[in-house]
Structures are given as C-alpha cells and as structure tokens.
C-alpha cells in the first residue's frame, strides 16, 4: 500500500513538472497568448501572469514596463537584469504595491522605480505569504523597499527607502523565517523592522543611513508583542553622508544574537534595551555602546566610544583596517585577530576575529603587513630660532616611531641623507641652521617591521627681510597621491593658506571628468581626499584642483598631478 502511494505521488509530481511552462514578455511582444517563445512574447507582464499556472517561469526582456505586478503562487518571474529591465511606477503619487508576491514565488533581476509612494515588493500580511525568494533586484525610492513575511531577500540593492525591509506579520499561529543576506540597504528611517512571529537572520549586509537628523537611522527596530530572536551577524554599517550622532542603532526589546558586525556610523546608543548576546562586534566612534547594561556583552572592540561595558574581555583598540573607508579586512598585528569569543571559530578553525569577516559566516584571508598611517595634522610654530613641530599620534599596535626629513628643495624625495630625527613622541624641536633661505620638512611614521608610511603634508620655512627674519608658510599646494600606482583607492593631499572654495576633479586622458572629489569651501589647513576607482581601465589619470580665495573671490591656485591606476 505504501509503495502504491509513493508511486502515485511520483507520477503526480512528474505530471505537474511536465505541465509547467516557460513564457516570455518583451517590449516588442503581442497580446496573443500563450507567449511560449520570444517571437510570440507578451507585451505585458501582468497579461502573461494572468494565463500562467503554479510552477511556470516567465522571462522578461529589456525595457521599461509601467505596470503593477500581481504574482500567482509558485511563479518564477525573472528579468533580463537590474540595469535594463525596469518596472517604473514613479509616476504614481498614491500609495501602491509595485509587486505583490504569493506563496513560493521567485522575483529576480528587475529594477523597481517608485517615488516614495508605496512598497517595492510586497508579501501580504493578511495572507501570510511564505517561502518566497527576492534576489538580484534594484529597488529605489520606495516608502518600504521590501515587505517580507517568510523567505529570502538576497543580493538586492535597496536604495533610499524610508523603511528598507519590513518583517511584520499578524498571524501568531505560524513561526516565520526571514533570511536577509548580502544586500546593500540604504534608508532614511529604519533598515530592518522585525515583527511578531518572524525570526530574522540578517547576515553580510551593507547598511547606509541616508537620514539627516539624529532621530533617524535605526538599523534594526524590534517592536514586538510576540516572541522573536533576531540574528544579526557580519553586517557593516558604513559611514553615512551626514556626520552626526543618530539616535539608536539596534532597538531590541527581546532577546537576540549580534555577532561580528562592524558599526562605523555614530550612534547615541548603538544597542538600546539589551539583547542577550553581543559578541565579536567592532564599534567605532559612537557615544554609548550599550544602554541598559547586560551580562553577555563580551569580546567586543569599542574604539573611540565614550561609554561601554567594562567586562575584561572587551577592548578599545585601533582595529588596523587595510583601508579605513573601503577595505575592512584586518592588517597583520591587528589586536582584533583571534581576540573574539574562543567558543566561536573562524572559517579556518582558528579563534574568531573581532568584527567583520570573523566567525563562521566570515571568510579566510591573508593578513597584509602594511605601513602605518601617514601622521596627521603636521603643524609647526616658530619660537626665535627654533621650530616646534607637532602631529597626531599613530594608534597602530605595531607602531614604532616617526621620521622627520628636511631639505632646501620643495617636493623633495625622502631618504636617509635628509633624515634629521626619529622621535617616538608627537613633537620635535629643530634649530634653523644659518645661511639658508628656505627649508622644507616632511614627516613619516614607521612600524616595528620597518615599514614606512608615505610622507604627508610638507611644511616650508622661508627666510625673508633685511635682518634674515623668517616665517613659517603653508602655501596652496596639491600633493602627489599615495599610493601611486593605486588599486583600488588612493589619497590626495592638498593645503590652503587662506579660506577658499576648492574644486577637485579626476579626469581620464581624454579630458573627461570621471569623479568630483571636492566641491566646497574649506578653512585654511591640510586636507586629504580619497578616490576609489570604479569601472575604469588601467592607465594614467589626472587629478586637478582649483582654489578660489573666499574673500577676494579670485582664483589663487591650480594644480595637476598624474595618477596611475593598475587593476
């Protein structure tokens, strides 16, 4: 009897598979079903869906489709690509659901355009839609980017939504699982909202806060009346456009697990109403790490955080990223290596690193032994025949000391013949030698492995007047980028002697602008702009700076430097 049942079920499944169809939609299609080839494709996504059945697949060709989409259960709707297959509902001013999902649906490779007027991808709360997959889509300017009850949200770009992902369900008879993985999520108010009976697994996402007020910017908001335990691991919260302290990072009234995340945005309270587990996180620059106490807040790095739990397993140290703004892998000798919870292992089986890329959801990589950062805020003050230099202290764990160089030529190359001091502290006094009319100084840092940083700003001492009276000058100047050649990022230093309006552009060799790095007024001083190469070819590029005096409103400086990009 059991064998007969199994055979019948197998035949039934094979019959269902045989009856499923592959259909097509194209901007050059027709309105005559059944749309079974590109030559006989439908000219409407919804018309094609209306004649489809459970298990069917619909491929949608390139073009802009101005229509709302209502799925049927078990349908796979696949676009030609998020860059070229567009569902555009930006003309709608009333609230709209762009794509309504049903059970067991797949929606992928589309670009959805709204105008803060509705939900991009919607899974009905009342119907409790389950087992859906939403992936490889670009969803822009939605009030709610994706509303999910149960399923996967993976590899999507959710751009500038009010609430990026909402997981709110009112059917407490079912436990829902929402997997939110490897998405880029930019939002004004809430990144992920967790609701009743939904267990959220948010992993490997990038969050960017677009809100410009300190009341905005919650990464995860958990307002529960039921029981739920969010799992939030290996996510990075990048620095937002606005450099201010947002109210709360994680608002969680019920237990949750938060491990191996990197918080670069600033919060008044990173965690509010303490979750059960906060481990292996790298939190940088916020005011208060955890509001409300908590006994399981361990093995975290709180760098430049005003207040954090004093558990002996927590540290406060420079993480030593490969690049502070774009590459958050750890350098060799970082104090975060193998400093996480010893019961949590990295992918290679070693003790977990603190922060991004650590733990079982991270990945193995080789730690690079890089030079320390260039010393910042290099300044000088004259006192009779003395020059007193000061600069910011380096914080790398393997830092050694500094190297101060001097020459009579501007833009000189550093070498041992020009080395005048190797101070370990952040100050030095030099005596101006006689019979010179100008001196130039450069400062580098060096680590214990003898790796030396690039020199930063150059300071000049010019001797003028009848009685050899000399002054320090900090003229306008565009410095050579470093590193050069570069891949993928490089920094370009520049200096202003007076308040001025600065425009800095990157050009290709044809003279076309490929990036605007600076376009704003600056106070006197030394600055650095960072350029990260996008989709460009290896070759020579030009960095140009134009400075206009703010008071006189006349151009005072133009500089151009060649940069070499190598893929």
Image (cartoon, helix red, strand yellow):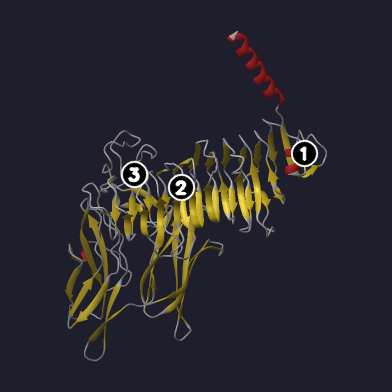
Q: Residue at x 72, y 52 (%)?
A: 66
Circles 1 and 3: CB atoms closer than 8 Å: no
Label 1: how many residues lie within 10 Å, few (<14), some (14-19) or many (20+)? many
Tell whether label 3 touches label 2 (CB within 8 Å).
Answer: no
Label 1 and label 3: CA atoms lie apart by: 54 Å
Question: Of the residues under marks 1 and 3, which one precedes in the sequence?
Answer: 1
* Residue at screen point 48% across, 83% down: 554
Q: Nearer the viewer, mark 1 or mark 3?
A: 3
Label 2 Cα crowd, 10 Å radius (few <14 / some 14-19 / many 20+)? some
Classify residue 100 by image quadrant: top right
Q: Neighbour class for label 3 at 10 Å: few (<14), some, many (≥20)?
A: some
Locate residue 406 relative to residue 269 in the image: left or right.
left
Residue 471 position within the rendered picture, expressed as x and y whole percent measured from the top left = 26, 83
- Name the residue furthest right: 32
Residue 41 shows which numbered tag? 1
458 and 39: which one is in front?
39
Question: Marks 1/2: CA distance?
Answer: 46 Å
Can residue 485 be seen at all in this image of the molecule? Answer: no
Above or below, 120 against 229 in this view is: below
Marks 1, 2: nearer the viewer: 2
> In the image, 535: left or right of 99?
left
Mark closer to the chain start, 2 or 3: 2
Taking the image as shown, residue 508 lies to the left or right of residue 498, namely right
Does residue 281 appear in this view?
yes
Q: Which mark is residue 276?
A: 3
Q: Nearer the viewer, mark 2 or mark 3?
A: 2
Q: Secondary structure at mark 2?
A: loop
Q: Nearer the viewer, residue 63 or 162?
A: 162
């Amino acid at each position: 009897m059991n064998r007969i049942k199994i055979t019948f079920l197998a035949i039934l499944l094979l019959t269902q598979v045989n009856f499923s169809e592959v259909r097509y939609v194209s901007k050059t299609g027709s309105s005559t079903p059944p749309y079974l080839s590109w030559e006989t494709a439908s000219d409407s996504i919804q018309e094609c869906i209306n004649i489809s059945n459970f298990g069917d697949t619909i491929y949608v060709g390139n073009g802009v489709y101005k229509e709302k989409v209502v799925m049927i259960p078990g349908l796979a709707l696949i676009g030609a690509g998020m860059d070229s297959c567009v569902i555009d509902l930006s003309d709608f001013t009333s609230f709209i659901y762009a794509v309504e999902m049903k059970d067991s649906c797949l929606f992928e490779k589309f670009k959805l355009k709204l105008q803060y007027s509705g939900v991009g991808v919607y899974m009905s709360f009342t119907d409790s839609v389950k087992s859906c997959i939403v992936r490889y889509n670009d969803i822009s300017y939605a009030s709610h980017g994706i509303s999910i009850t149960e399923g996967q949200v993976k590899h999507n770009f959710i751009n500038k939504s009010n609430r990026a992902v909402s997981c709110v369900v009112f059917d407490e008879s079912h436990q829902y699982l929402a997997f939110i993985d490897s998405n880029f999520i930019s939002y004004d108010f809430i990144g992920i909202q967790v609701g009743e009976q939904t267990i959220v697994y948010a992993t490997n996402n990038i969050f960017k806060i677009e809100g410009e007020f300190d009341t905005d910017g919650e990464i995860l908001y958990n307002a529960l009346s039921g029981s739920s335990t969010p799992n939030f691991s290996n996510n990075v919260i990048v620095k937002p456009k606005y450099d201010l302290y947002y109210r709360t990072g994680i608002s969680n009234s019920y237990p949750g697990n938060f491990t191996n995340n990197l918080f670069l945005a600033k919060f008044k309270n990173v965690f509010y109403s303490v979750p059960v587990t906060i481990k292996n996180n790298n939190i940088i620059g916020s005011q208060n790490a955890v509001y409300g106490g908590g006994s399981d807040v361990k093995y975290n790095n709180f760098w430049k955080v005003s207040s954090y739990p004093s558990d002996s397993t927590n540290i406060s140290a420079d993480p030593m990223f490969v690049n502070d703004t774009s590459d958050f892998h750890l350098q060799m000798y970082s104090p975060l290596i193998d400093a996480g919870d010893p019961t949590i292992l990295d992918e290679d089986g070693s003790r977990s690193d603190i922060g991004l890329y650590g733990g079982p959801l991270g990945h193995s990589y080789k730690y690079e032994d890089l030079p320390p950062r260039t010393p910042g805020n290099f300044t000088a003050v004259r006192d009779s025949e003395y020059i007193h230099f000061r600069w910011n202290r380096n914080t790398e764990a393997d830092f050694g000391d500094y190297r101060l160089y001097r020459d009579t030529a501007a833009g000189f190359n550093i070498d041992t013949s020009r080395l005048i001091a190797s101070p370990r502290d952040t100050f030095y006094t030099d005596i101006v030698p006689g019979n010179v009319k100008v001196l130039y100084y450069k400062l580098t840092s060096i680590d214990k492995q003898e790796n030396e940083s690039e020199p930063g700003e150059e300071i000049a001492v010019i001797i003028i007047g009848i009685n050899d009276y000399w002054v320090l000058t900090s003229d306008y100047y565009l410095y050579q980028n470093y590193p050069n050649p570069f891949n993928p990022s490089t920094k370009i230093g520049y200096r202003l002697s007076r308040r001025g309006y600065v425009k800095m552009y990157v050009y290709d060799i044809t003279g076309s602008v490929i990036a605007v790095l600076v376009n704003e007024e600056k106070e006197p001083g030394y600055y650095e702009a960072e350029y990260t190469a996008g989709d460009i070819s290896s070759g020579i590029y030009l960095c140009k700076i134009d400075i206009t005096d703010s008071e006189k409103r006349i151009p005072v400086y133009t500089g151009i430097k060649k940069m070499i990009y190598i893929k």
